[in-house]
Image (spheres, grey):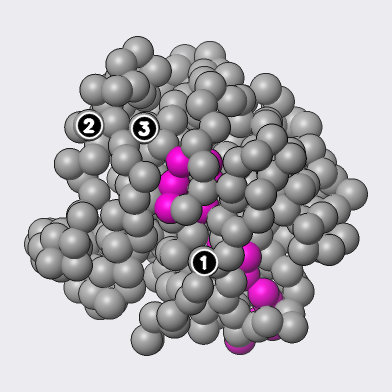
Amino acid sequence: MTPQPDSVRTIRLDDGRVLAWHEFGDAAGFPCLFFPGSATSGRAGSALDEAAQRIGAKLISVDRPGLGASTRAPRRALRDWAADIEELSSALTLTRFAVLGHSAGGAFALAVAASMPRRVTRAVIAAGSPPYAERWTRDDHLVAPTTRFNNFLALATPALFGRLFRLSAPRTRDAAERMVSALSRGRSEDSRFVQRHPEIARLLMESLGDGFAGGPDGPAEDVAIIARAWGFGLDAVSVPVHWWHGSADRNVRTETGRAIVARIPRATAHVISGGHFLLYDHAPEILASLTE
């Protein structure tokens, strides 16, 4: 696979902020808005270009506030993200569209689906994050200790968390290459994915670095926003949801995905072989559920 070049596109929102996005896939295809994982810019959508073309989907891969070329929007609730997407979809004259979210981006996809049921045809989530502020995620021990600690830091000391978080983001192509090399050393499903697809892993690391282009505050806020109360319940998501989860995911466990699916009225679970990178490892299969 050869990553496709793209040029970032922007609009100015009603409140004066800039919202940026990237386009991949079939330019004349059915529109799908893609929200990548934590602190990752919309450049990550390039890794899905071929799969989107294959199913006839136009992938609109968005830089969330404070990531890539998009302006920060501090102290917003997750549900506020839907207002940004409503402005973007109206500017692009999208009357109907699907949403796709990976990892933390799944929460942003669900927020849009819950707020815009007449425009969102379906939501496809891969390895999505749970609503961490909900008591059931703690009572049922569905959140890993490391994730709980990171969420605590993001909420309690965002400036410190941002500086620490930045250490995990490559600032140069050489740094991205070193991260890919480090990720490939292991026996986990994610390590095996990197061994099979180093060029995709490199693109994802570069997209993570691009997420920090405006500094660490935006990425830190991107983590905090899903650690706070979402402002809507999972039962408010009325559109069909296809939830994909890797059976060997160490970031968000399979039982966490099943617990989320049980709380969404029209959700279908797909547990397949793979780790947290399953969206990029099984892109044709997962993206097919956007339009089937």
Does residue 66 appear in this view?
yes
Q: 225 or 14: which is nearer to us?
A: 14
Residue underneath mark 2: 163
Name the residue at 60% across, 41% down: 17
Report crowding for label 3: few under 14, some 14 to 19, many 20 or more residues within 10 A (C-alpha).
many
Q: Secondary structure at mark 2?
A: helix
Tell me which amino acid carries mark 3: Asp
Q: 204 or 210: which is nearer to us?
A: 210
Report the number of numbered marks. Answer: 3
- The spot of residue 186 in percent (x, y) is 12, 59
Label 3 vs 1, first from the N-terminus:
1
Tell me which amino acid carries mark 2: Arg
- Give the CA separation, mark 2 to mark 3: 8 Å
Residue underneath mark 3: 217
Q: 235 or 28: which is nearer to us?
A: 28
Label 2 vs 3, first from the N-terminus:
2
- Give the CA separation, mark 1 to mark 2: 26 Å
- The spot of residue 252 in percent (x, y) is 40, 41
Residue underneath mark 1: 8
**Is residue 46 shown left or right of residue 183?**
right
Q: Is residue 166 above or below residue 275?
A: above
**Marker disc for residue 267:** none
**Is residue 88 shown left or right of residue 178?**
right
Q: Is residue 185 above or below residue 252?
A: below
Name the residue at 29% across, 63% down: 206
- Give the CA separation, mark 3 to mark 1: 21 Å
Q: Quadrant for residue 82, please give it.
A: top right
Q: Secondary structure at mark 3?
A: helix
